[in-house]
Image: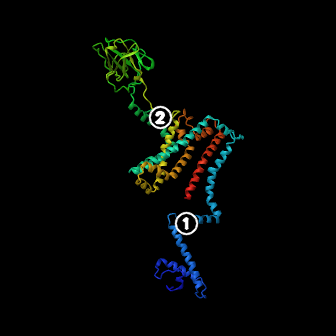
Amino acid sequence: MPTPSNPSSGATGGIPEDTGAPDAPVTGAATSTSSHTDPAAPPGPDTDTEAGTETGSAAGTAAGTGKDAGSGQGAGPRAGKVAAGAAALRRRPLTAALFLLPALVVLGALVVYPIGYSVYRSFMDADGSSFVGLDNFAEIFTDDGTLIAFRNNLVWVIVAPAVCTALGLIFAVLTERVRWGTAFKLLVFMPMAISMLASGIIFRLVYEQDPDRGIANAMWTTVHDTFADTAPWPEARPRTDAPLKAAEGGAYLTRETVDAASPVSLPLVGIPPKEASGAAPAKKAAKAEGGKVTGTVWLDFVKGGRSEHGVIDQREKALAGIEVEAVKDGRTVAKATTAEDGTFTLPASADGATLRLPAGNFAQPYNGVDWLGPTLVTPAIIGSYVWMWAGFAMVLIAAGLAGVPRELLEQARVDGASEWKVFHKITVPLLAPVLGVVTVTLMINVLKIFDLVYIISPGATQREANVLALQLYLKSFGGKPDQGAGSAIAVILLLLVVPVMILNIRRLRRESRR
């Protein structure tokens, strides 16, 4: 065991004599280095200097490496591991090939072969029996259905990723400041757990035209009816033998003029009994004084019973809320509205006039918006896509937002920047790489959209909602299958996706170098 005065200890580069336990390995290394010298040679200054220099260099290198490893970058050890792994693979290429072979076989069978066969098939005719060159591509660019699909795909690529990314950014930023932010993120992200097929079925029901079935029109009609009057009895109409006749615009006029001497009877039919079940019983109007004109409007029908036409009997139901106008020489001289019991009273000026029931009494109720009509079918389907994928964008952006230095945001607020400027000038630029990932990913996704369009769009408007993936399916497996043209559409779709993928790969490589 060497003593502190041993020359080999001095070869470590001047370690103090009271060196503790952590330096013992270095002293041992120095001793081991000195032991490689010739034992017969005297411990001259050259030997000691050489050993000390070598050991000191090793210690210095180790110290330098430790300093680099302790830095925030951590690039030294990682680069060393990568280089060592690459060197090992170069020494044993057969082993590397064996490990990669299963993945290459699956990739070739599921990706490379279908792509190659589709390219080959795009130059063949419908049944694949003869070579047609570029005829399939020429047909595609002259077919109206395919051109509509190109147009709709362009709308999808521009609108859907932009809306999803914008909503994801807004949700991610706003939910950072509320206690229930996690619950909100969970609710927004939940649609991602639903398949495209199930989402299409859900929104097919949401967009139903009938407000009693479609929630979109149920909400829309509720808002509309809040600010607009609706017809009280839209399905009412007179019998052919009733004292009313049809007039222009959907109104009804009395066949004869009225007078104050006798009350007027205006019977109507066409209303389902269940809709009038809550109405009050009709009451025959009494003769009014002062030359006023009175009358009754009622439902001249009794379910399961016999009633006399034009006569109030068997507790027939009154039709309240119907507007009655007195017309003389084409000019309205008086108006009245039926009461709960169906009766009405007009002033004396109505004596000798013709009574009119305006068309507004019988106007059909507002049924909302035709969401799946030719005009709105594509925006409606894009809305269902946004419902599904806004949560995906929000989660990725929220993860990127967690890495934004809070010191920069706080410093900007201290310097007097408003919240909008902090968001616009600092948060968004720092999140630019994440926003790029989300946007490019969604662009690739919408180029291949098929399920939602096929399920949501009805047959009458499927042409207006058509996209390339759906057109590919219809061409290849529709009523007149032409797999040559379908393969040509698949090749074009691939050529549209490839540039976006290359852009994404280049961006990922740039990010990995940072």
Q: Position of residue 60 (x, y in %)?
A: 54, 74
Q: Is residue 42 visible?
A: yes
Relative side of 452 to 350, left or right? right
Residue name at image x 54 percent, y 75 percent: 59
> How many C-alpha atoms fall within 10 Å of the one at disc 1: few (<14), some, or many (≥20)?
some
Relative side of 238 to 6, left or right? left
Q: Is residue 198 visible?
A: no
Q: Which residue is mark 1?
A: 76
Residue name at image x 61 percent, y 64 percent: 86
**Dot 2 amino acid type:** Glu
482 above or below 427? above
**Are dots 1 and 2 in contact, CB under 8 Å?**
no
Q: Position of residue 73 (x, y in %)?
A: 52, 63
> How many C-alpha atoms fall within 10 Å of the one at disc 2: few (<14), some, or many (≥20)?
many
**Regarding mark 1 in the picture, which secondary structure is present there?**
helix
Q: CA distance from mark 1 to mark 2?
A: 62 Å
Q: Which residue is mark 2?
A: 208
**Dot 1 amino acid type:** Gly
On-image quarter of the C terminus: bottom right
Q: Position of residue 155 (x, y in %)?
A: 55, 40
Relative side of 298 to 208, left or right? left
Closer to the chain start, of discs 1 and 2, is 1
Q: How is the image coloured?
A: rainbow
Quadrant of res 38: bottom right
Quadrant of res 91: bottom right
Quadrant of res 333: top left
Residue placed most toward the observer, 131 or 431: 431
